[in-house]
């Protein structure tokens, strides 16, 4: 099968969750013999923080402006079996117009940000990466979020056939690694700064750090403001590139996952960080969101915290108890949530529509 993807980015993981997901999916597709071409607008924001080492059998086309790549994109689409346009793609509308000119294609829209999309649609009435006519023209609409989000994509945007395609992890890359002194901590947190995560992060990370002066806490991520409420025992690493993720997770017995408010409110929207940390066999502590049990079993494969007191209790767990949780989580991920699993799901969905 030949697939053409018009996405936000695959070349840079800086400040977004799209790149690592697409790298795993594209590698999995290429390994199965499928041809993949990924079109990405070459914006300075990502060009200055590019961390893709190789394309492992798929093609990446970086272009300065749509007008300069349209002819090449048209040729790629003309020879493709399926074309996918994603949320936050800078040229989503132009790409949609292009692919819909080819009736023989399977036309797919993949919203990797569904709760944010629907929230913006309700509050602003328009979202720049959505076609003006909605999603009714697509043969298949995929959502990173399941549950009621799938119904809303139908009712609010006219999607005719919808399916969840959740996040995943490239198990060939994310695995237990040798600890690094750079990332050593009792509790770690890996994530880009987001205002709608801040209250939960202060509750589940900053306040526990204040209460546990004998513990070492570590944040890895980009875009943290100068007025972030640091404590003396919270250490910071500015942007941890994907090649360093396994070492980051493997250097602490416990890592925190905090869900953005729109995603937590809608539910059924697991962060890719959950699967990545679990694949590295690190015990995960997470805030609760509806549908979490569909991905990990609370208490055995993941630990749930709502208050600073909950975090303090988990920090008292023995190393053996945390290793047990991490091992169970890794087993679950390898059996259900790898890029290979999502690749097979994607192919089955496309082939069912072809």
Image (cartoon, helix red, strand yellow):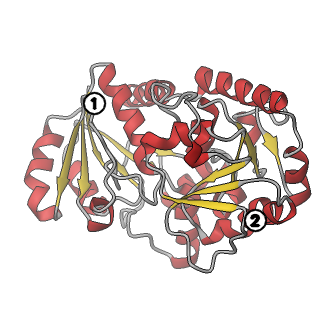
Residue 180 image-quadrant placement: top right
Tell me, for residue 120, which label it has, or none.
none
Rendered residue at 69%/48% (across/down) = 185
Q: Earlier in the sequence, mark 1 or mark 2?
A: 1
Q: Quadrant of the N terminus?
A: top left
How many residues crowd mark 1 within 10 Å: few (<14), some (14–19), many (20+)? few
**Front in this rendered view, residue 303 or 339:** 303
Q: Is residue 83 above or below residue 327?
A: below
Q: Is 238 on the left or on the right of 333, as rendered?
A: left
Q: Is residue 165 visible?
A: no
Residue lying at the far bottom of the rendered structure: 227
Residue 173 pos. (x, y %): 46, 30
Q: Position of residue 332 (x, y in %)?
A: 67, 24
**Residue 116 quadrant:** bottom right
Answer left or right for 23 relative to 216: left
SS state under label 2: helix
The tally of labels here is 2
Mark 1 and mark 2 residues within 8 Å of each other at the beta carbon = no
Image vertical order of residue 305 relative to residue 208, above or below: above
Residue that appears at 76% across and 48% down = 290
Q: Which residue is mark 1?
A: 56
Q: Is residue 339 left or right of residue 100?
A: right
Residue nearest the observer in this picture, 156 or 75? 75
Q: Which residue is mark 2?
A: 206
Q: Position of residue 80 (x, y in %)?
A: 20, 35
Q: Residues within 10 Å of mark 2 (few under 14, many from 20)?
A: many
Dot in front, 1 or 2: 2
Residue in view at x 11 percent, y 64 percent: 67
The image quarter containing residue 251 is top right
Residue 25 can be seen, yes or no: yes
């Amino acid at each position: 099968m030949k697939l053409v993807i018009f996405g936000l980015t695959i070349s840079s993981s800086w400040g977004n969750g799209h790149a690592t997901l697409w790298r795993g999916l594209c590698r999995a597709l290429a390994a199965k013999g499928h041809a993949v071409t990924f079109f990405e607008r070459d914006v300075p924001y990502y060009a200055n923080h590019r961390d893709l080492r190789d394309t492992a059998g798929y093609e990446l086309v970086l272009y300065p402006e749509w007008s300069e790549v349209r002819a090449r994109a048209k040729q790629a689409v003309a020879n493709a079996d399926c074309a996918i346009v994603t949320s936050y793609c800078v040229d989503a509308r132009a790409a949609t117009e292009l692919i819909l000119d080819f009736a023989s294609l399977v036309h797919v829209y993949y919203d990797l940000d569904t709760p944010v999309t629907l929230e913006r649609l309700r509050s602003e009435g328009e979202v720049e990466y959505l076609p003006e006519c909605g999603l009714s023209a697509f043969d298949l609409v995929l959502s990173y979020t399941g549950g009621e989000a799938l119904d809303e994509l139908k009712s609010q945007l006219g999607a005719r056939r919808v399916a969840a395609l959740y996040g995943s992890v490239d198990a060939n890359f994310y695995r237990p690694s040798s600890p690094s002194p750079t990332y050593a901590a009792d509790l770690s947190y890996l994530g880009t700064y987001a205002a709608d995560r801040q209250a939960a992060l202060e509750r589940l990370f900053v306040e526990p750090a204040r209460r546990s002066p004998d513990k070492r806490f570590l944040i890895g991520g980009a875009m943290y403001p100068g007025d972030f409420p640091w404590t003396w025992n919270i250490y910071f690493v500015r942007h941890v590139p994907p090649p360093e993720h396994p070492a980051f997770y493997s250097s602490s017995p416990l890592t925190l996952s905090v869900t953005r408010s729109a995603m937590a409110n809608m539910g059924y929207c697991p962060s890719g960080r959950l699967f990545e940390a679990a694949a590295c066999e690190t015990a995960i502590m997470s805030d609760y969101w509806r549908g979490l049990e569909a991905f990990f079993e609370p208490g055995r494969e993941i630990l749930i915290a709502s208050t600073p007191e909950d975090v303090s209790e988990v920090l008292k767990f023995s190393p053996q108890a945390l290793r047990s949780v991490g091992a169970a989580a890794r087993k679950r991920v390898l059996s259900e949530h790898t890029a290979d699993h999502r690749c097979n799901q994607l192919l089955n969905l496309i082939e069912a529509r072809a």
